[in-house]
Image: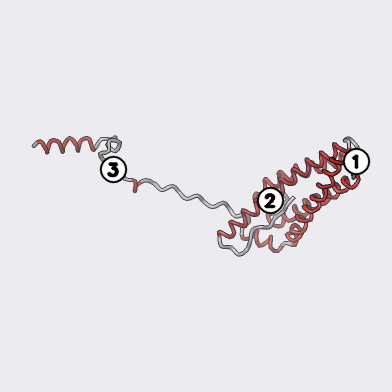
Amino acid sequence: MLKLNIDRMIATVDRCPWSAHAGLTVPNTASLPTPPAEAPPPALYTPEERRRRDESPWTIVQGVLAPLQFAVFLVSLYLVVDYLLTGEGYAIATASVVIKTIVLYVIMITGAIWEKEVFGRYLFAPAFYWEDVFSMLVLALHTAYLVALFLDVLSSTGLMVLALAAYTTYVINAGQFVLKLRAARLQAAADGRTNTDAAGPMA
């Protein structure tokens, strides 16, 4: 009789909502919902966009202009810094910045044409939206240098400092594109695609 009464008391407590905290029941974890797996990031190109990219002659143009601009940048950076340190070579440093800016204009124009052919718009396609936004700052600072140079509103040192500011934004922007295209390449490899996604505009 005593055992029967004890069993009834335990059964009564076991039905209370706090019984699991008391260690009287084992929670059924099998019924808990499984958190959904994280969806992979969207591909940089859709299959149709990838086809248009591969067929566009502007893809090759971008592939040639991007390293060319970087080479011009390195030479110009050396000349600008050398002038700031020594006070000599202003003319050649100035010419190098002008050439760098012209190359930037060319790659921006051809890049917009490429973006139109691949994504259907000249600028701010979702795949490269923030890269294009920052490219506008790069373009603005390079243009500001030309305006200041031809209007003679800054000293020679001021012009070179402005050129360095423009070059800083260029390096950041180039880094944006490199990281974006590297992520696309890794994703393409993970997906088992033979076609790499690593092609795009680079300001």
Provide the secondary structure element on which disc 3 rests: loop
* Residue sitting at x 58%, y 56%: 187
Which of the 4 image quarters holds residue 45?
A: bottom right
Residue 69: % across, % down = 79, 53
| Residue picked out by circle 1 | 150
Disc 3: CA contacts within 10 A as few (<14), some (14-19) or many (>=20): few
Q: Is residue 151 left or right of residue 7?
A: right
Q: Amino acid at mark 2?
A: Phe
* Residue sitting at x 86%, y 48%: 96
Provide the secondary structure element on which disc 1 rests: helix
Residue 165, relative to residue 121: is it above or below? above
| Residue picked out by circle 3 | 26
Q: Report the Cα–Cα distance between label 2 and label 3.
A: 53 Å
Camera sees residue 179: yes
Tell me the quarter of the image containing the N terminus: top left
Residue 93: % across, % down = 87, 46
Residue 178: % across, % down = 68, 52
Q: Earlier in the sequence, mark 1 or mark 2?
A: 1
Q: Amino acid at mark 3?
A: Val
Disc 2: CA contacts within 10 A as few (<14), some (14-19) or many (>=20): many
Q: Is residue 152 left or right of residue 39?
A: right
Q: Amino acid at mark 1?
A: Phe
Q: Report the Cα–Cα distance between label 1 and label 2.
A: 31 Å
Camera-side residue of 124 and 66: 66
* Residue sitting at x 29%, y 38%: 20
| Residue picked out by circle 2 | 177
> Do the residues under discs 2 and 3 have CB atoms within 8 angstroms?
no
Residue 153: % across, % down = 89, 35
Q: Earlier in the sequence, mark 2 or mark 3?
A: 3
Which of the 4 image quarters holds residue 136?
A: top right
Count of numbered badges drawn on the protein: 3
